[in-house]
Amino acid sequence: MRQSIIEAIIKNSQNHPDKTAVVIGDDQISYKSFVDRIIIKKEELEDKGVVIGDRVILAAVPNIDYLAFYFAIHLIGAIAVPVDKAATIQTISDVIEDVQPSCIMLNESIGTSDYEETAEHDDIQLPESKSVADIIYTTGTTGQAKGVMLTHANMIAGAKNVIHGGNVQKEEVCLLPVPLHHAYGLTTMRAIFYIGATLVLQDGFASLKKTHKNIHQNRCTRAYLIPAAIPLLIRQTADNLPALLGILNKLEFCTAPLNAHYRKLLNEILPKVTVYNSYGATEAARSIYMNVSENMDRCEAVGKPVEGVKVRIADPDCPEKTLAIHQVGRLVISGDMVMAGYYQRPDISSQVIVGSELLMGDLGYMDEAGYIYVLGREQDIMNIGGEKVSPQEIEEVVLGSGLVQECACLAEKDERQVLGDIPVLYVVYKNAGDNQGKALSLFIKEHIEKYKRPGRIVKVDVLPRNYMGKLDRNRLRECLWENGHAGKI
Amino acid sequence: MKEKIEMIFRELMEWDTTEEVTDDMSPENVTDWDSLITMSLILQLEKEFSIKFVYDEVINMDTIGDIKRIVADKLA
């Protein structure tokens, strides 16, 4: 039983020394050389004075040295604090103030090494499974920035969830085009190394040439994507997504639920590809999985808890009370992947961790077969005349019209004080033309119940998204406030 | 045509007119050139020049120079 991801990597290097661990562009490294590089980086960090328990800030530069430094920190028994490679000085200053690091490794300190790599493997001391390995900064569950502490044991449990939920095999070659300071990228990367598969790392999707080369040259079998990438890839590939994917036959989507429209679209254009949807949080890795291709009759569900994970739906006002099936409440998750707490914030830690359970910020419900449906973040749910309505529910129907490229629904207070909230829909139309608005209104009238219909439809040029491509509803609200609910966002 | 492509790219990047657009620019070496820029560039070029790219063309568009060459070939 491996106690840490670094232990699993070392075991893999002993069992399959020549197997490729990582490919990044033209660089690649075997498991044996990867461990050598980790040991060399460990010595470099120790020379800088890093000792057990220290915090080390590490800019997530997509190269092999970043990965080597990350696991070198774990091997020392220190704590990695990964930050966005494009983080502002203010963001980094805030993190420095919070974690008081003994060492800061920013972009220029994490180059790509160019040397023969051999290192002594004797007397390797492995970290304690219950000790903290990472502090990941997130605004998730509570809405304010804080450091999520993950132990080595949390990481092992998270990796197992990804492997079991997505049926990952060690022979696989996995394309990961998402940043490595975010939970999605980090948890996936750790799972790939835990099982001993091959990681192909890519810095986003801006270059389709690079994506094509990575998939075809490395014979990738699986890719980890975000739902926002679907329209981008379809459009970028001139409607020829199968040509891009080649032999790749598994896709996983996370960070936002894969909506029914995209599930049907992928099922139609990629009939031979198995699509997975996963749901999770920085605080609890990925805990709920769905094989979308086998469950086309449950297009709105995010999935079922993976083995070892328990999910219940709790009364938002009384979390210890479990609600019945189909009743909307707060998602509560428990399992070995649930974080140790927020760094130096016992006040907010105790608000979300009760006993061994993590109270999520999302509302949802469970059906009779145990499938979980997530309606959205508690603060985004609209209250229309007493009915709880998820903005995603309206957005999904609107996306299904085929008239819009993207859309977002926000609540506006009913000035007449009759309905509570009124949904307002912000849309980016697929085509220009005066009749687009009329056609959409007609579609909405035919497909959405009267009380849920948007009070207004506002045409916008683009919707704000965060670096993970996730719709940024807070930024949208701010932009609308600044621009008077019109114009360019 | 080349100037038009540079102008479209400059507008998408929200650069001012003094900013030079060179043929060796690619998502690799231009900060903020993300997948949304690539997609918007493809759409704008198709609209501006009344053309439609096919897959083999799109996967060979890496640098500004590649894009100019592919558009020129389509218009020839």
Image (spheres, rainbow, N blue to C red):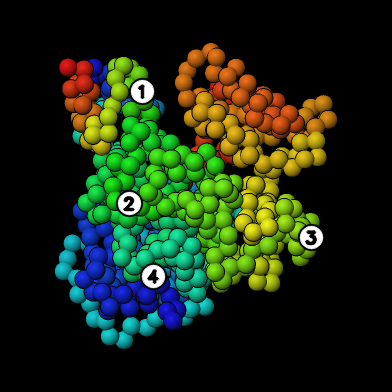
Question: Are the residues at dot 3 and dot 1 in contact (C-beta closer than 8 Å)?
Answer: no
Marks 4 and 1, how far apart at CA? 44 Å
Q: Residue at x 64, y 59 (%)?
A: A369
Chain under label 3?
A: A
Q: Secondary structure at mark 4?
A: helix
Question: Are the residues at dot 2 and dot 1 in contact (C-beta closer than 8 Å)?
Answer: no
Q: Is residue A15 above or below residue A141?
A: below
The label nearer to you, 2 versus 3, is: 2
Decide which of tag 2 and tag 3 comes sooner along the chain.
2
Decide which of tag 4 and tag 2 comes sooner along the chain.
4
Residue B44 is tagged as 1
Q: Position of residue A113 (x, y in %)?
A: 22, 62
Label 2 is placed on what type of residue? Leu
Residue A318 is tagged as 3
Chain under label 2?
A: A
Q: Which residue position holds label 2?
A: A248
Q: Position of residue A192 (x, y in %)?
A: 37, 64
Marks 2 and 1, how far apart at CA? 30 Å
Chain under label 4?
A: A
Question: Are the residues at dot 2 and dot 3 in contact (C-beta closer than 8 Å)?
Answer: no
